[in-house]
Amino acid sequence: MNVHFSNYICSICGRGFVTERLYSRHVKRHATEELKCKDCEKIFGNKEKLRNHQKLVHLGDAKRSKCLICDERFMDYRQKILHMVKLHGAKEPSLLCQVCNRQFNDQRNLTKHIKKDHLLERKHKCQECEMVFFSSTTLKVHMAKHTGLRQFKCDICLKAYARKNTLREHMRIHANDRRFGCEQCGQAFVQKCSLRSHMRSKHGTTL
């Protein structure tokens, strides 16, 4: 949305932003301070970069999720569970959706599922049409239909696509990745739609 609705333009690098808050936060990143990390020798250009470095690299208060078996600490609950399963043989947790009985390995995925599939939460609305979406990522992909923006380009043939997944599928052509095989004649195809077309025209069946 910052790309398509640039109300505030950075005079240093030219990037645009929807809100003044996002713009102000970005401008601070251009500040030329020299801030040294108190735990190592690295130097950073602003306080935000220094703060992010300390959270990610040094323990501090960031790694609060402690393993129940050893003293290892982690950034979040999911990392802790993976550690306990792999290193200590703990049982993978299983959370059950009370509506459809689907199982999830952590509370975050279960909550996301309930909001998206059962509560039908759609907070992200397209400004160009009436469509609404659960996530900002899905909205961003949708916006390409209105703008015609094709930012994902193939390095080999220079074809450009609006979606990263479409480019990934296209790259299988160059790799000759024929993962979709016909069970009747053995002919293989790069894309599933090509296999469907083959099944209809050659064998008179649908996939």
Image (tube, grey):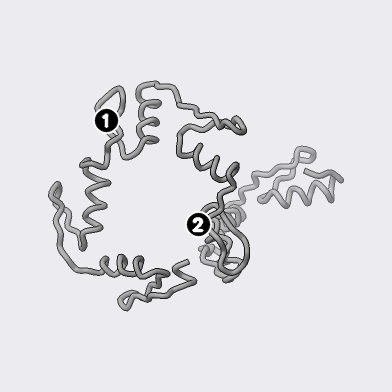
| Residue at the (15%, 52%) spot, across then down | 37
Horizontal relation, residue 112 to residue 200: left or right: left
**Badges 2 and 1: C-beta atoms under 8 Å apart?**
no
- Would you place residue 179 above or below residue 32 in this image? above
**Disc 1 packing (10 Å; few <14; some 14–19; many ≥20):** some
Picture coordinates of residue 22 (x, y %)? 36, 66
Find residue 50 and name its label. none
- Would you place residue 152 above or below residue 81 in this image? below
- Nearer-the-camera pick, 58 or 150: 58
- The three-letter code of the residue at mark 2 reads Ser
Query: Residue 63 sits in which quadrant?
Result: top left
Q: Secondary structure at mark 1?
A: loop
- CA gap between label 2 and label 1 equals 34 Å
- Nearer-the-camera pick, 138 or 111: 111
Picture coordinates of residue 79 (x, y %)? 37, 35
**Disc 2 packing (10 Å; few <14; some 14–19; many ≥20):** some
- The three-letter code of the residue at mark 1 reads Glu
- Total numbered circles: 2
Find residue 72 and name its label. 1
First along the sequence among labels 2 and 1: 1
Horizontal relation, residue 193 to residue 87: left or right: right
What residue did someone put label 2 on? 136
Q: Secondary structure at mark 2?
A: helix
| Residue at the (50%, 57%) spot, across then down | 136
- Nearer-the-camera pick, 12 or 22: 22
The mark closer to the camera, 2 or 1, is 2
Picture coordinates of residue 205 (x, y %)? 84, 43
| Residue at the (54%, 41%) spot, across then down | 113
| Residue at the (39%, 31%) spot, across then down | 82
- Would you place residue 38 above or below residue 22 in this image? above
Q: Residue furthest front?
A: 119
Picture coordinates of residue 158 (x, y %)? 55, 67
